[in-house]
Amino acid sequence: MTPENNDPPLSEPPLLDFGSDALFLDFDGTLVELCDRPDAVEVSDRLIDMLHALSDRLGGRLALVSGRAIEVLDGFGMGRLAAAGSHGSEWRLAGGSRKFLPRPEGLDIARKHFTLFADTAAGLLFEDKPLGAALHYRLAPEQRDAAHTLAEDLAQAHRLHLQRGHDMVELRVPGVDKGTAIGELMKLAPFNGHRPVFLGDDVTDEDGFRAVETAGGTGILVGSERATQASHVLGGVAAVNEWLARSLQAGASEGAEHSNGGMP
Ligand SMILES: [Mg+2]
């Protein structure tokens, strides 16, 4: 939906339904603010505590769905949560072991080219991932076109998937995305049989929105409204944190009412 085609503006989503929903959360730009350097992102104890409380309340039906590697997400203190990392190339249930697709050989060649290119201008950052290779140009916006041309050439030569994100371009395992990642987790307990809700901010999250909306769930765009497959919107990271906290609060008082109601 876009303001140009006269669709009504997206509305704020209803609070989570802890009885029926399965919650899928993008990380950067959704739960935490974007940073100039991906390793400089700030994750508060309050956020980590809230995610664990939500996961408990949902019976484990909460998963992070990120372009980051699962091991990087774990480094932020989220190792007990279910997760799909590297844009769907790896996944894990809460408390389970990590499953992942094989690393294509072309990624090693892409790593070499990206590293050499990143050395040619100040502000370019190469990010090595177990199942991907990314170039960040947030601090060198004049390098955008050159970065994209290099990535396009490498993607074609080595049959890698080209992913464009916020001020970055990434090469990764082909054939998977955030939508397939959510689909795979939805086949497994405790997610199966529930209604998927996915929050994300980036163009890479559109695959996830499409997957959950097709499955009868809800896609929630984070940030300013734009052309999207999502049906609801939250204005930014602060609004997401507030919506999650309010859901948790409402769910807790509902749970208390039920348990009181069951008292003789
Ligand atoms: Mg994001």
Image: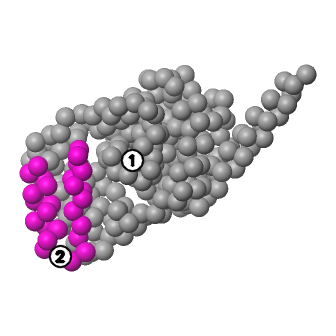
> Which element carries disc 1, helix, strand or loop?
helix
Q: Nearer the viewer, residue 228 or 97?
A: 97
Image location of residue 246, percent across then percent down: 70, 50
| Residue 179, quarter of picture | top left
> Which element carries disc 2, helix, strand or loop?
loop
The residue that appears at 87% across and 25% down in the rendered structure is: 263
On-image quarter of the C terminus: top right
Start-end of magenta stretch: 108-134
Q: Please check the rendered image and state whether residue 80 is part of the magenta-colored stretch, yes or no.
A: no
Give the labeled residue for mark 2.
121
The circle on residue 162 is: none
Q: Please check the rendered image and state whether residue 115 is part of the magenta-colored stretch, yes or no.
A: yes
Which color mode does the image show? one colour
Q: Are the residues flagged by discs 1 and 2 in contact, CB closer than 8 Å?
A: no
Q: Is residue 143 left or right of residue 219?
A: left
Say few, some or many: other residues with alpha carbon within 10 Å of mark 2 (under 14 / 14 to 19 / 20 or more). few
The circle on residue 74 is: 1
Q: Is 257 situated above or below 118?
A: above
The residue that appears at 34% across and 67% down in the rendered structure is: 37
User: In the image, which is nearer the foreground, mark 1 or mark 2?
Assistant: 1
Q: Amino acid at mark 1?
A: Asp
Q: Amino acid at mark 2?
A: Ala
Say few, some or many: other residues with alpha carbon within 10 Å of mark 1 (under 14 / 14 to 19 / 20 or more). few
Q: Earlier in the sequence, mark 1 or mark 2?
A: 1
